[in-house]
DNA sequence: ACCTGAACACCGTTCAAGT
DNA sequence: ACCTGAACACCGTTCAAGT
């Protein structure tokens, strides 16, 4: 895009890093190669980025910023508000499959992540959730987005790698894995699946707010206080 | 444990890799260091492990094997069955925080993972779920386990790293992030939180089975077929 | 048969030196 | 002020050579 002779800047390095990961995956993103892409030695990058770790954190935050859309994040219904952000996050990550790994793993909390957390929390508080329950709700929503998307992003590669997965489709492992053998052949649309989980979680949160906690399994810690 | 002069084996390499990651984290696991730990040159490991990637995959599968407990995975109630495996997986991953990253990211499907998927699927089929819905249920359960645990494992480091997180606790960012500032100070027990999400998801699945789908948000794909 | 030393093609990062 | 070359301490992996 910009002529290679242009002065470097934090943003130009960041954009080049995103483009490199988009084009060749996260594994191809080395400081040396990123420098080459910008027509510069690797060491020049350190003038604008304190370390590769910091660069990765900046990449995460740039992506998470795309999850929120200030102009669209305040429709009347809190279910729509929450659903919108969950679908936007999901779509954004699937558009950059390499980002799932990065976002799942990097612990740095940047402004994008804070603004995302704020948006979800506010939607819940506005809907009449207690601060306590809104906090739990944020973590449940966060877990839903990340977990489902990570699992979905992993799936295509899984099929390609697993010799046994192919056997499952062919039905030759019925004895060992009867359950999966029976379910795996159905037609499955995974966008539908995500929409289903999103609504399931939002519905569960609504019930919690309305004082209708889920039926308890006898396992795990007691959460009586959490939903009071 | 075993005297260092013992012959190497796939299992001895695997156990040493797990121990090394437990003791010093995933970043410390290099073939050279792993060799040193076994009193051997790095290159000797390649006689028993075809690549580092294969070793990582073996580590994942060894861990996932611990999620299932054949003697305990068939209590009468399907909710208890499902809850048990979800809590067992959660506890196993939190006991080895470095495993979360590995399990989330590696796409290889080994026997442990297949047996885990089989256990969840069978529990759902036995409870009267359609093959279609049992398949979706597996992905929803999987996403719940991974997403929530990843997010929880990330949290302690997040607090330590983020200068702004500290500010949030101190309340000095109320103007910028009013929602989070209000919720973050509450006392939160995160084991309770996981138990809550587990029951919420199981309850939602039960409703799906019983033909009471969640209220729809107008977003995402239509999942009419998925729940038919 | 099993292990090793030297080597190859990489990493992130430092630092003194160049312009 | 900004960029670079050489260097340091690492990687995973190969391969011919040792025992």
Image: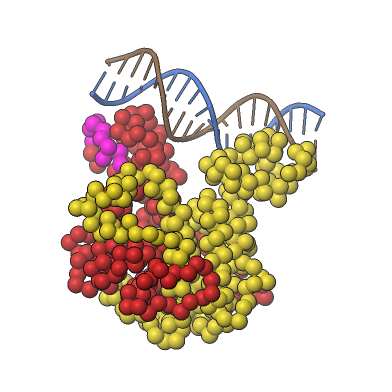
Chain colours: A yellow, B red, C blue, D brown
* Residue B98 visible in the displayed image: no
Residue shown at 66% from the left, 49% from the top: A14
Residue shown at 40% from the left, 33% from the top: B32
- Which quarter of the image is occupied by the N terminus of chain B? top left
Please state the horizontal and vertical placement of residue B22, each as a whole percent of the image.
Answer: 36, 49
Q: Is residue B96 left or right of residue A111?
A: left
Q: Is residue A43 above or below residue A84?
A: above
Q: Is residue A133 magenta?
A: no
Q: Residue furthest left?
A: B71
Residue shown at 38% from the left, 31% from the top: B42
Q: How many marks?
A: 0
Q: Quadrant of residue B168?
A: bottom right
Nearer to us in this view, A27 or A56: A27
Q: Is residue B186 above or below residue A180?
A: below
Q: Residue furthest bottom?
A: A211
Please state the horizontal and vertical placement of residue A185, each as a whole percent of the image.
Answer: 33, 56
Q: Is residue A48 above or below residue A89?
A: above
Q: Is residue A52 left or right of residue A197?
A: right
Q: Quadrant of residue C16?
A: top right
Nearer to us in this view, B118 or A99: B118
Residue shown at 39% from the left, 52% from the top: B103
Nearer to us in this view, A89 or A49: A89
Q: Is residue B11 magenta?
A: yes
Please state the horizontal and vertical placement of residue A5, each as a whole percent of the image.
Answer: 78, 38
The magenta stretch is: B3-14
């Amino acid at each position: 895009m910009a002529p290679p002779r242009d002065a470097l800047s934090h943003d130009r390095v960041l954009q080049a890093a995103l483009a490199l990961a988009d084009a060749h995956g996260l594994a191809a993103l080395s400081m040396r190669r990123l420098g080459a892409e910008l027509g510069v030695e690797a060491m020049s990058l350190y003038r604008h980025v304190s370390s590769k770790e910091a660069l990765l954190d900046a990449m995460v935050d740039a992506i998470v910023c795309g999850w929120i859309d200030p102009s669209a994040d305040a429709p009347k219904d809190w279910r729509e508000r929450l659903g919108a952000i969950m679908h936007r996050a999901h779509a954004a990550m699937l558009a950059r499959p390499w980002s799932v790994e990065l976002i799942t793993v990097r612990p740095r909390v940047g402004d994008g992540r804070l603004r995302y957390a704020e948006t979800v929390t506010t939607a819940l508080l506005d809907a009449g959730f207690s601060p306590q329950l809104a906090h739990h709700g944020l973590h449940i929503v966060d877990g839903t987005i990340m977990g489902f998307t990570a699992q979905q992003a992993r799936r295509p590669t899984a099929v390609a790698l697993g010799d046994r997965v192919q056997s499952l489709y062919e039905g030759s492992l019925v004895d060992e894995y009867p359950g999966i053998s029976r379910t795996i052949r159905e037609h499955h649309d995974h966008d539908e699946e995500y929409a289903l989980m999103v609504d399931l979680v939002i519905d569960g949160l609504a019930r919690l707010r309305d004082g209708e906690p889920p039926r308890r399994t006898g396992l795990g810690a007691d959460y009586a206080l959490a939903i009071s």
